[in-house]
Image (tube, rainbow, N blue to C red):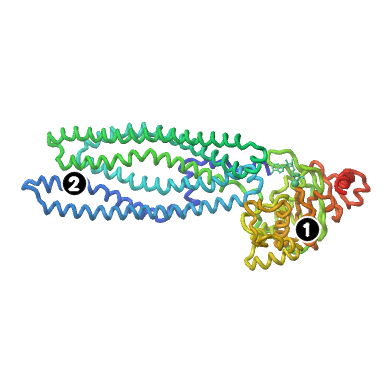
Amino acid sequence: MSDTDHRMAPASTLGVFATLRRGTQVSPQLLDGLVITVLLAVVAAVGRVVVPIAVQQTVDTGILAPGGPQVERVVWLAAVATLVLLVGAVCSAYVNVRLFRSSEAGLLALRTRAFRHVHDLSVLTQNTERRGSLVSRVTSDVDTISLFVQWGGIMLLVSGLQIVVATVLMAFYSWQLTLLVWLCFVPLVVVLQPLQKRVNARYTAVRERYGAMLGAVSEAVVGAETIRAYGVADRTQRKIDASIGGTRRAMVRAQNLVATVFASGVLVANLVLAVVVVVGTHLGVTGEVTAGQLLAFLFLVQLFTGPVQMATEVLNELQNAIAGWRRVLGVIETPVTVVDPGADGVPSPRGPARVELVGVDFSYPDGPPVLQDVHLAVPAGSSVAVVGATGSGKTTIARLVARFMDPSAGTVLLDGADLRDVELATLRERVVLVPQEGFLFDGTLAQNMAYGLRDEGDDEARVREAVDALGLDTWVDELAAGLDTPVGQRGESLSAGERQLVALVRAHLASPDLLLLDEATSAVDPATEVRIARALASLTQGRSTLTIAHRLSTAEAADAVVVVEDGVVVEHGHHHDLVALDGIYAAMHRAWVSQTR
Ligand SMILES: Nc1ncnc2c1ncn2[C@@H]1O[C@H](COP(=O)(O)OP(=O)(O)OP(=O)(O)O)[C@@H](O)[C@H]1O
Ligand SMILES: [Mg+2]
């Protein structure tokens, strides 16, 4: 496996049509019932040109009829026109609803698939690619597509057809005037296209500034305590003011351009109308068009200019949507590096787990080797402690055993089976990693403790049982609201030690065969320390345990100790043997003893 496998494709490199094809393959719902939608759009477009036809007929055959005005015919024409208008409006609304439905269904599928895929990606891919960018791909990029499919789809369908129908009808009344209108408008589209691009660039700038502003504001809110502690409130405020000001300037710049573009569009449209009136009157005098036809023509020009002005905007929306689509497809097409063998995996029945690392090498993407030729064994039911300086690769070992990633060389074996051959669902049941800093979700203590429970059941009772089993009932009872105590965002209402206790209850509920414990480095008060030690004793009872030990008391109690230095196992044996060896471990231990006792 090469390092580049871990990185996410920045965006798919497909061409426009290939992107559309691939996009509709991923979300086939987008094409559901498209034929009927197009037919309805045709009816809607025809419905919109009924007014000019009715006007022409009313003037030429009703009001200016050879035998004097024919009121009955005018009423009849008005009635028919109203009916057609109504049918057109209903069809148009129905086209909206249908496009909305199919696009929401299609984009739901896309979003779900992208989200699932993000979950399947190894932690490495998620680390390399900033998580925020992944979130924006699954949310706002999909929104861009959705905006285009709904709004742009309507524009393309109904307005595109409206342009066609209006042109056909205009040509029917007067080919000379039609030619004139087209000649006036083609240059407008040509001029508007680059202008619209600049509008887009300015809006991109607005979005970037806005994102930066949100970042600055939320960071200041989240970090309020640190800001206050260092008395840097003024400086922070200036930074925030600057980013708010930047957003405002970017917005004003964008709006100015939009106003100019819009005003020039309206101006050109009205100039064209004026030209049509002048030339049309001329043609009328020579008998080439009737009064009714000229009037109808003026209406048609308006039906024509609206969508033409929109066309450039739609094209840009289309470009945005394609870009968004490429980014989302890029997520979906990023290869999953930690491949799940699924049901084809070798059976891995529950029971005391035996783990071995055989000649394991590992390096993070683009990084130096972190582990080199690591050999390590945790016999079934025994406890092994890994000790070593910070950055020596201890957490990396735990991650490899949990198969958050695969080793660059060598193998990790669970009961003799290569981890790569064990179904991930089974592996997650048998092996649980309690990370150095567990993540707590906004909710109650009980909800967080029950977080790892996969099956449905009486969570409350099971949490209670686990709390009792770990001897934490006195602690929970001391809390104001007991198990219903809210933990705050990321558990910030709890102390570091309390967060560890929650993590231990979580692990107990998951009831794994092998427990990977990455001891927290944060110091806790003596009372909590005792609680943690007691809870750990019950938690590790009868289970294979691999502990990344920061407290050497854990190493003293373990069946075996592994000393890691710069990614290499340098010492291995029981605590007493290693002390007797008088090597690195003995020195670490002496330092620790003099500090704590
Ligand atoms: N996600 C990552 N991406 C890139 N490099 C990483 C990543 N995680 C760790 N490293 C690097 O790998 C090396 C080993 O890190 P590791 O977290 O395994 O150390 P550790 O022994 O657990 O340290 P500590 O005692 O501080 O927890 C370090 O040099 C670290 O910078
Ligand atoms: Mg660590």
Q: For numbered disc 1, what is the local secondary structure?
A: helix
| Left/right of residue 88 with respect to residue 258 in the rendered view | left
Secondary structure at badge 2 equals helix
Q: For the residue marked with disc 2, what is the amino acid?
A: Val
Q: What is the number of the mark on residue 433? A: none
Give the labeled residue for mark 1. Answer: 531
Q: Is residue 351 above or below residue 593?
A: below
Side (left or right) of 198 relative to 76: right
What label sits on residue 55 in the rendered view?
2
Q: Which residue lies furthest to the right in this view?
A: 580
* Residue 39 visible (yes or no): no
Please provide percent x and percent y for residue 124. Answer: 66, 45
Between the residue at mark 2 and the residue at mark 1, the CA separation in whole angstroms equals 88 Å
Nearest the camera: 162 or 79? 79
Quadrant of the drawing holding the N terminus:
top right
Mark 2 or 1 closer to N-term? 2
- Total residue callouts: 2
Q: Quadrant of residue 366?
A: top right
Ligand 1, what quadrant? top right
What is the three-letter code of the residue carrying label 1? Answer: Arg
Q: In this view, does 294 lie above or below 558?
A: above
Image position, residue 257 (x, y; %): 40, 33
